[in-house]
Amino acid sequence: MSRDLVDDILGRVSKFASILGISRSELKIYSTLLLDGRSNARDLSRKLNISYTKIYSILNKLEDRGWIRKIGKRPVTYEAVSLRDLWSNIKRILELKVNEFEKEFIEPLSSMIDSTSAYTVVVVPPTGLKKTLIDVLNEPSNRYLIAISFSELIDEEVYQLINTKSFNSEVRLILQKGIRLPEKSSIEIRILDNMFGSGVVTSSSVMLVIRSHDNLSSIISNHRYLVDIAQVYFAHLWDQAIPISTNP
């Protein structure tokens, strides 16, 4: 992978990573170790044009995060952990940040409003996934934002329900490349090469679906903050997706 392509990727993800307290320099050093292999601090400093003192500070931070590990002594070299381990680490950071926001902002505000306005976050077992998906699609809403990356989610029953919603509400559907609808559709559809998961966002709730250990699992919430984040992220995917005029 060329250095220009890596820089382009870092440029696109840095603004999201900064929300989690992850700097571009940290991403750059991790990426370099992952792609180029083990290296010592002096070589990294020279290759990335980062001061020797700053390199050590960032390496220590990455080691504390669990992104890299030390190998040998004199000179100490560093190597990157696998992408799978990195992703697990980032998901833990995200969970901690969300929990912190919930504790410091959402919970205090929730205690000040009527209990009937309280939010819920529910984990959906695989056996209840389809029923929950249909329940969400049956919610009254002026907009349904739908992303499907798992073909088993879009059978005839679900498709007909989505199609029905388009008569009275705005429906936007993103399909992962290769997934086909049961029949041609008049719904506004776009295609993405790859998506991490699937989901449905309505005016008042969000349902997220991921694959874990060969099973589909899901959470559903009416948490206003999570709904807003889901709407923003869907808009980001929508802008990246390719419009189509017929059934893919």
Image (cartoon, rainbow, N blue to C red):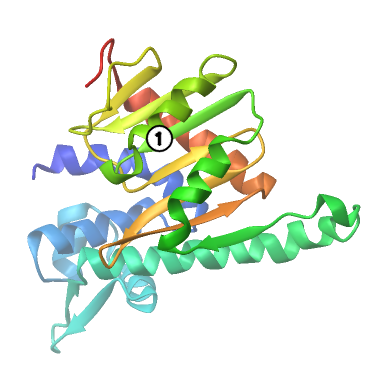
Residue at 74% x, 63% y is 104
Q: Residue furthest bottom?
A: 73
Q: Is residue 133 left or right of residue 228?
A: left
For the point 47% across and 37% down, which residue is it?
A: 233
- The kind of residue on which mark 1 rests is Glu
Please report the residue visible at 47 percent of the width from the left and 29 percent of the height from the top.
Answer: 161
**Above or below for 162 versus 75:** above
Which of the 4 image quadrants contains residue 60?
bottom left
Occupied quadrant, residue 239: top left
The secondary element bearing badge 1 is classed as: helix
Image quadrant holding the C terminus, namely: top left
Nearest the camera: 156 or 54?
Answer: 156
Which of the two residues, 113 or 1, is positioned nearer the viewer here? 113
Give the side of residue 123 with respect to residue 174, left or right: right
Q: Is residue 73 shown above or below 137?
A: below
Question: Is 225 situated left or right of 18 in this image?
Answer: right
Q: Which residue is mark 1?
A: 157
* Above or below, comparing residue 139 to residue 82 in the picture: above
